[in-house]
Image (cartoon, rainbow, N blue to C red):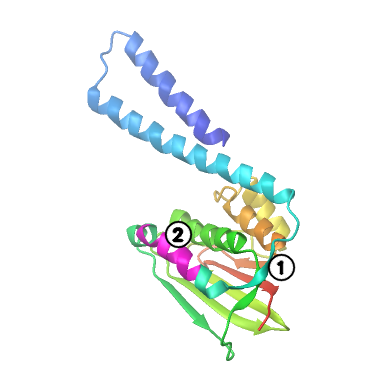
Amino acid sequence: MSAPLAAIRMHVRAKDGAGSSKRPLVESDFRASLARIDKLAAAAQRMLDDVLAVERLKERPPAMSESLIDAEKVLGEVVAMQAAALERVGCSIFVKRRDGLDRVIGRWNQTSLERLFGNLIQNVVRHAPGAPIEVSFARRDGQLQIRFADGGPGLPVDGRDAGEAFAHSAAGETGHGLGLWIVYRTVAELAGQIIMQTGVGQGLSFDIRLPLEC
């Protein structure tokens, strides 16, 4: 979050210096700076929200539900909420079931599933505009396998385990902020596992395993 805040301070100081000098302020430059500050403030707010979400996740027990939840239906609801953002950046999403899986149900916490799918989609919207998204559901070793893949630029972190890769994302080394770290924490909250595969120019793909009840 320090980067957006530092940039905001830089813009404010620059305009304050221009106003106190003999050089008059140009309205178009001033408005452009205000627009830039507004974008930076929004970025800082998103990062703050992510930090608070991670802190809340650390204190939670596994998020399970007493009733059966349809993960495919939850994904559909999240996609509907994100439809405008996906359309704005030109991302299409394709969903399928594999291996004869007729239902995608389990005792998962719906809010956690929404957070998981929402952060995965937002990561593509923010960092891979125009990339196609493929989501598939399958049964693997008594678990639900969710494969979420995009055709974006990928990250130079392939070969690390999931925890290390997401930790580097959380530290801001990849430019993806804390979004992927929240994905990692949310999967753990759902009593699942996650493996990320990526490489420069190879997109991002996630193999997520959750307890499955059919």
* Mark 2 or 1: the one toward you: 1
Give the image location of residue 9, x and y in percent: 48, 24
Q: Secondary structure at mark 1?
A: strand
Q: Residue at x 61, y 77 (%)?
A: 105
The chief SS type of the magenta part is helix
Q: 144 or 29: which is nearer to us?
A: 144
Residue, far front: 66
Q: 151 or 116: which is nearer to us?
A: 116
Q: Earlier in the sequence, mark 2 or mark 1?
A: 2
Q: Which residue type carries mark 2?
A: Ala
Residue hosting label 2 = 128
Structural crowding at the residue carrying mark 1, measured as other residues with C-alpha within 10 Å and reported as few (<14), some (14–19) or many (≥20): some
Q: Which residue type carries mark 1?
A: Gln
Q: Is residue 141 left or right of residue 20?
A: right
Give the image location of residue 198, x and y in percent: 59, 66
Q: CA distance from mark 2 to mark 1?
A: 24 Å
* Marks 2 & 1, CB-CB < 8 Å contact: no
Q: Quadrant of the N terminus?
A: top right
- Which residues make up the magenta segment? 75-84
Residue, far bottom: 100
Q: Quadrant of residue 182?
A: bottom right
Q: Is residue 24 visible?
A: yes
* 37 drawn magenta: no
The circle on residue 193 is 1
